[in-house]
Image (cartoon, rainbow, N blue to C red):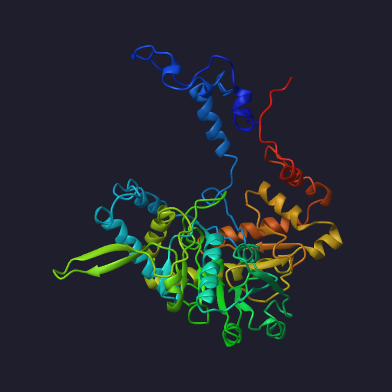
Amino acid sequence: MRNQQATQLLFELSKPGRRAARYPMADVPDRPLTDLIPEAQLATALPPLPEVTEPDVIRHFVNLSTLNMSVDTHFYPLGSCTMKYNPKRHERLASLPGLVDLHPYQTPAASQGMLQFLYEMQQMLAEIAGLPGVSMQPAAGAQGELTALLVAAQYFRDRGEHRTKVIFPNSAHGTNPASAAIAGFECVQLNQSEGGYVSLPELQSQLNDQTAVFMITNPSTLGLFERRIQTIAKMVHDVGGLVYIDGANMNAILGITRPGDFGGDMMHYNVHKTFTGPHGAGGPGSGPIAVRDFLADYLPGPIVTKEQQPDGTVVYGLKTPSKTIGRMRTFFGNVGILLRGYCYLKTLGAEGVKAVSDNAVLNANYLLQKLKHVLPVPQGERCMHEFVASAQKLKTEKGISAMDIAKRLLDYGFHAPTVYFPLVVPEALMMEPTETESKETLDAFAAAIEQIITEDPERLHQAPFTGPASRPDDLKAGRNPVLKWVAKA
């Protein structure tokens, strides 16, 4: 049954004269508003806000929330995004007095506890990356990419080198070329060799004294670890370039290998993915970057410092690197997400962090084996934390597309995997189960897909059937968004 209080706008529920609260009359002397506000600045009419009761408001938003899919309500195998469960313990810890109520203008002397946690987080991120310089200021992964590329640009300017090109594989996240372009670089895209790995001959053909950075996600968006990464890094370093590791897929290698050890000079983390901060719908996020020691002076500030005083006490402070590129955002970034990541890392410890990746890889390979007979996986009999299946054969033989499967999964109570990315796999379904899902959940998900592909293709084209909307015109909505409610005549 259609829940009108969830699917109607508050404007549609509005009735003149209804109120959620009524306030007593003001007991201050009655003065003309023009004594306080210039007449030209006064509104000529009340804003056209909905008039609803408190139960209307509460029921509307509570019922609306039940239409959402989230990691708290459903399995969320969104490839390349690591949508793992967010422990509620971390939410409680991040809300403790003294943490949640700190003001960003408080002095370092009045914020020693918070600065200690930030310093320790810097050190843990440096250790996991194998890269000693860390800035936690970037607000999300894409801004982390941009920050690192601006650091690289400043580094080359400081050396008097005019390097213009950033190279990346064709399976890269779209933010890689976008960040490079914003940072002022020319983008060079590589094709892949057979098997989904970087083509070394093609890479060699593009490397020269104009090469600034080679950007690579390792493991890649195809769920493959680039086995020749050290050779690739040496090729880039031999022409004076830097290697950037996109950290979106760190969930596969935590505690097992480190970007700094296999040749990376810079990387970003997605704390809101890898370290269980809640994320989605554009935020909040946190995208710290880690860099080699010779790049640390260019990082955006502030960086947290630790000094031991003559009397033995430890004092934490803030320092701006000597050649900094400047701030990327206000204050210190999204500290609440950093705090949740800190709790996660402290809870797990070194062995626990490694177990995260072990289990993420195990879950992904288990799901791959369950599905590969109905959804072929073009690249790799084994994968890391995710894999990319293809519905191309199903589409050719039965007319069932990746989108049909994704939409119908909603009726079975599962969020869809990523579809049609990366573009190098036709009819792509990119699946990442993460380490937080049980065998029973993965079995149920695989069974749902097996059932879906036996259904009538014409019916699948109309799915989903259980939500308030089936298949809205996404293209039309993007090009002609309706941003204002207009009452019907």
Q: Residue at x 86, y 62 (%)?
A: 397
User: Residue, x 60% and y 73% (percent of image)?
Assistant: 215
* The N terminus - image quarter: top right
Give the residue furthest to the right.
397
Where is residue 10? Give x, y as percent.
59, 27
Above or below — where is 376 with respect to 438? Answer: below
Q: Is residue 82 visible?
A: no
Q: Position of residue 319 (x, y in %)?
A: 34, 64
Judge whether 403 appears above or below 1 on screen: below
Residue nearer the viewer, 29 or 24: 29
Residue projecting furthest to the left: 311
Residue 390 in the image: x percent, y percent? 74, 65
Horizontal side of residue 102 vs 169, given as left or right: left
Residue closest to the eye, 196 or 26: 26
Q: Which residue is rendered at x = 43% and y = 13% of the image? A: 32
* 344 left or right, relative to 200: left
**Residue 73 to residue 200: above or below:** above
Residue 112 image offset from top left, x and y in percent: 26, 58
- Picture quarter containing residue 164? bottom right
Say which residue appears at 71% left-offset and 84% top-offset: 205
